[in-house]
Amino acid sequence: MLPENIWEIVARKLSGEASEAEEKELQALMGEHPELRETIHAAEALHLTPAVENTVTEMSAHGWQQLQQEMQDTPAPSRFRIRRLLIRAAAIVVIGLLSYNWWQHNSGTSIATGDTKDSILLPDGSRIFLNAHTVVYYARNYGHGSREVSLQSGEAYFEVAQQENNPFTVHAADVDIKVLGTAFNVHRSANGQVDIFVTSGRVKAENKHGSSMVLQAGAQVTSSEKSPDIRPVTTSPENVLAWKTNRLVFNQMPLSQVAVVLANYYQLDVVVTDSVVSHKVLQATFNNKSLDEVLDIIGKALNVNITQKNKTLEFHP
């Protein structure tokens, strides 16, 4: 969330009058909001060239001399003062452009799912499949010069329409995922961890620490706010898309790992209380089965007891 006086701070920065504290605050905000960083950098590039400055200064001095005919004992402003006034005026104009650009980026469409899944078709033909309890956002100017989507929480699968000159970017926590045309899954945990799985094409993942990795189809990586690196994941990808395919595959999988898959798929907390139980392995495939059906089969196959209370499952001897 940006402070209410953000554009006043930006104006002071552009005119060279921002305090050290304001400069630090802006740097932090620019790190959190890429579009703010890009817009400020573009505004800083709109500086006065020496030729333009000289011309404007001469025009200002000439105009002041004409005004002096109607005013007494009013000295013409110095060249430095004129330049300061010009910078202030330019900053005011630029702030209007900045505000409009920010509005374009930050007024858009937010889609949130509750207990059910959903999908949306974007203006460019790309499609997003949303898991339950997921929030995605895209700006009003999506497709016009940029294609950016923010995964604010939950999990989504992206099928991206290819546009050679207009990359598609997903922002998830501190990770940016950039592609041209591909399909991939992104899961954003509440603790800031981001997991990426590519099913076709390739993507580039980069975090705020500067760590980056190009992923081919079949690759999985994870990134955490606590670690500066994007790391490959070695676990089986069979159930990464279970939420979308409604197919669970357990190939000699220990119950401790089965519990993690069930927790993600059924949106539950799953606890294994005994080490012996946790090492029992499951060989089973479930196609679009209810939780009760799955638990009944697991309990009988592994000879374990399962207790369910509200949103918590417990496996025990």
Image (cartoon, rainbow, N blue to C red):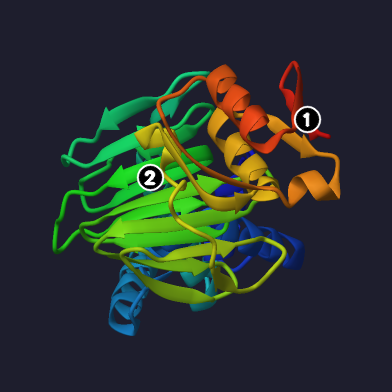
The N terminus is located in which quarter?
Answer: top right
Q: Is residue 109 above or below residue 162?
A: above
Can residue 209 be seen from the camera position used here?
yes
Task: Please give the residue where the numbered disc 1 appears in the rendered image.
Answer: 314
Q: Secondary structure at mark 1?
A: strand
In this rendering, does residue 173 appear at all? no
Q: Say what amino acid the circle numbered 2 marks.
A: Val
CA–CA distance in space, label 2 to label 1 = 37 Å
| Residue 78 shown left or right of residue 145 in the figure | right
Badge number at residue 149: 2
Mark 2 residue crowding within 10 angstroms, few (<14) / some (14–19) / many (20+): many
The C terminus lies in quadrant = top right
Decide: is 236 above or below 50.
Answer: above
Task: Identify the amino acid type marked 1.
Answer: Glu
Residue 178: quadrant of the picture: bottom left
Q: Closer to the camera, 54 or 245?
A: 245
In the depicted view, which residue is nearer to us: 39 or 266? 266
* Nearer to me, 36 or 246: 246
Quarter of the figure with residue 102: top left
On the picture, is 110 further left or further right than 282? left
Counting from the top left corner in percent of width and height, residue 127 is at 25, 38
Relative image position of residue 300 (x, y in whole percent): 64, 28
Q: Nearer the viewer, mark 2 or mark 1?
A: 1
Instruction: Give the residue displayed 42% in from the left and 57% down from the top.
Output: 197
Image coords of residue 3 (percent x, y): 65, 42
